[in-house]
Amino acid sequence: MKQLYPLLLLFATFVFSQTEGRLSGQAVDAKTGEPLPGVNILLVDTAIGQATDLSGRFELSGIPAGVYTLRASMVGYRSLQIRSIHIPAKPGARFTLALEPILIQEADVVVTAAKRRQSIQDSPNSVGVLTSRDLVQKNEIYLDKMLENASGVNFIGSQINIRGSSGYNYGAGTRVLMLIDGVPVLPGDSGDLKWDLVPATQVERVEIIKGAGSALYGSSALGGVVNIITKSATDRPLTHLRFSAGLYDKPSFPEWRWTDRLLHFDDMDVDHSRRIGKSQILLAAGRHQSTGYSQNGSYQRMNGSFKWFRPVSTHANLTLAANWEAGKRGTGLMWRSQRRALEVSPEAVGDHTHSDKLSVNAFHQWAARSTLAVKTRLSYFRNYWKNIFHDNITASTAQKFGLEIQGDYQRSAVHVLTFGTEETWDQVQSGLVGNHDQYGLSAYVQDERRLLRTLSLTLGGRYDYQHIDTGFRDEKFSPKAGLVWQAHSSISARFSSGKGFRAASMSERFSDSIYSGLRLAPNPELRSETAWSHEIGANIRLGTLMNLDIAGFSSDYWNLIEPVPDEAQNIQFINVTRARISGLETMAKFNPGIRGLTCDVSYTLMNPRDLSLNETLAYRPRRLLQTGLAYQFGPVELSVDYRYISRLDQVKLYPMDDRVAQKTVDLHIGFQWQAWHLSGHVYNLFNHNHTQMERTLMPIRHFVLTLRAAV
């Protein structure tokens, strides 16, 4: 890798001898004139592009002389194209891009499916997008709660399932990879998802790629990828404030009441962005606390974020970003009994966990020429936790160091090559798993080519090597292929097939402890899980009336790692399962004909089979239904969401317990007045009682009032 930069510098000596120019401007709402942050700006058929900052501004530099087409796109707005832009432009030339809001979304721009900016219509994989507008409307602080409304997604505890991929493995590892601005943030010890690392107030959008994604992203992208894209800094002073408070209702049954205290929670978040010299800086901080709705459910959390952006030349820029979260939370794995479902066993009262997480990333982006972009990323992630339980006290510190170099080469208007290499090193010191080091090295390439005017082909693959200090080694090659056929201007069809894998986490390999009364036993010879995912789908857009997406999918899994209890409830993680999950997913967003009214419906039907035991795969529902109805009239907005998850046919630990389907209704109302936004929310409106993981009752009805301001 060290030899790469001199070669690129020699190549740049010729490249930069040509005449170059820049484009700048601002994206605004065509109706209100308000600036639009997060708009994707792209010079068509080049590698040059960026997202607008918090004040809607953008600046593209290092553009070779020529004639270009500029495209601006954002979820919730009609895409805008400006043709025949001559570079170099006249001195001081600026563009004001007025985007028209629409109720039914056109083709957005995503960045994660191919590790580069591309239209969602060009992706051979199904991709879901949640925007900052969705986050405001649903008023969620933590992203796992927000993602429950995404198509094909459900949770078992903190484990996210994309089309049933994950199941539940008690917080040790994940089959869905989580990224923050494209950087993996899975800790080296537990390998699970830390949803509280970035509060929703700092999120611009979330992209959900469905199906195996290891051909570009490596381990843990077995069932999909979730990329959290954070807000960018702005060049003018701007402050956002958010205050929120809420109350938990009484439980459904008197015997479930475990305290006479008023159970409540409150949140406070603030961020400020401005330009200092040539730099743009964003600072954010938050405090979140709750009594919890159940015993041992309380928490106190603090978080902070920092983002610094600076152009270092006309051809390159540098971004530094950091996210920190620390706090204390009560811990209770299971209820005391079904009649005392909101209590823990008497000896576990007071069990709690301290945690401290820090993510620091540096990004260098270099436009070597209009057709070649080089991105370099350095990353560091530290995860510390300490369990103070009645039956054990255990602490762990995991540090992850990462380096990635990626190139995007636009060979022609119909041919794009993405390639790169990634290196990681994990260092773990833990009372749960011991002290271990883990090293990973990978290389990947993806070739996207338009074969015909309406047909595009994607081929790619990635090689991953892993070494653990115990001597364990593993190598994996993950290929992928995809086709996209633009049958009509409003109809596109897609096909994809790819391999995924997940290396066992250190918690799965080496855990030797007691967790809330459950004995965990080590298994250092665990092999990696592997999968093949296939999908065929179509997207149909009927102007501003309807957007319909339908996809059939099938995933085969080998060596799935599952927690297997013995008769004494001692648990060991074992490569035990050969499985197949197949199904159908449909998503529709339409305008029923009433101005300001939109409706979202998604339905997923799955057949999750454990082929080893010839039975239903544990912890996977067969049917998912998410619906949303939203109405906006002037400054007032109303919405209602309904979520249905069918009863789990199979669980592992307590199969004789009662289980029911999940049926949840959430109600939201908001009012906008100038820079102020006031909203009220009722979650679990009908106080439906259900569990996701065994013997843990999910949140009862609660009420929230939120005030937001931009000053």
Image (spheres, rainbow, N blue to C red):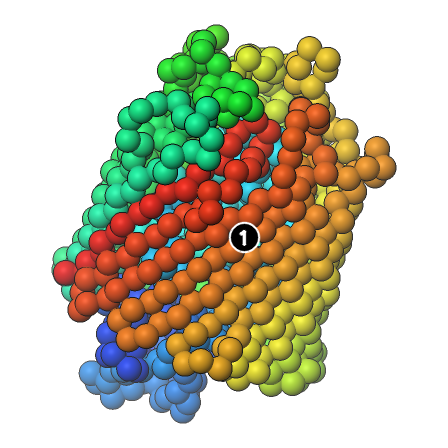
**Is 657 on the left-hand or right-hand side of 393?**
right
**Is 376 on the left-hand or right-hand side of 563?**
left
Residue 506 position (above or below residue 419): above
Residue 15, by quadrant, is: bottom left
The residue at 65%/85% (across/down) is 488
**Element type at marker 1?**
strand
Residue 184 on image: x %, y %: 48, 44
The residue at 84%/33% (across/down) is 613
Residue 530 position (above or below residue 459): above
* Quarter of the image with the C terminus in it: bottom left
Residue tagged by mark 1?
A: 643
Pick the front one: 321 or 46: 321
The residue at 51%/18% (across/down) is 336
Residue 414 on image: x %, y %: 60, 78
Pick the front one: 444 or 652: 652
Q: Is residue 290 visible?
A: yes
Q: How many marks?
A: 1
The residue at 23%/51% (across/down) is 242
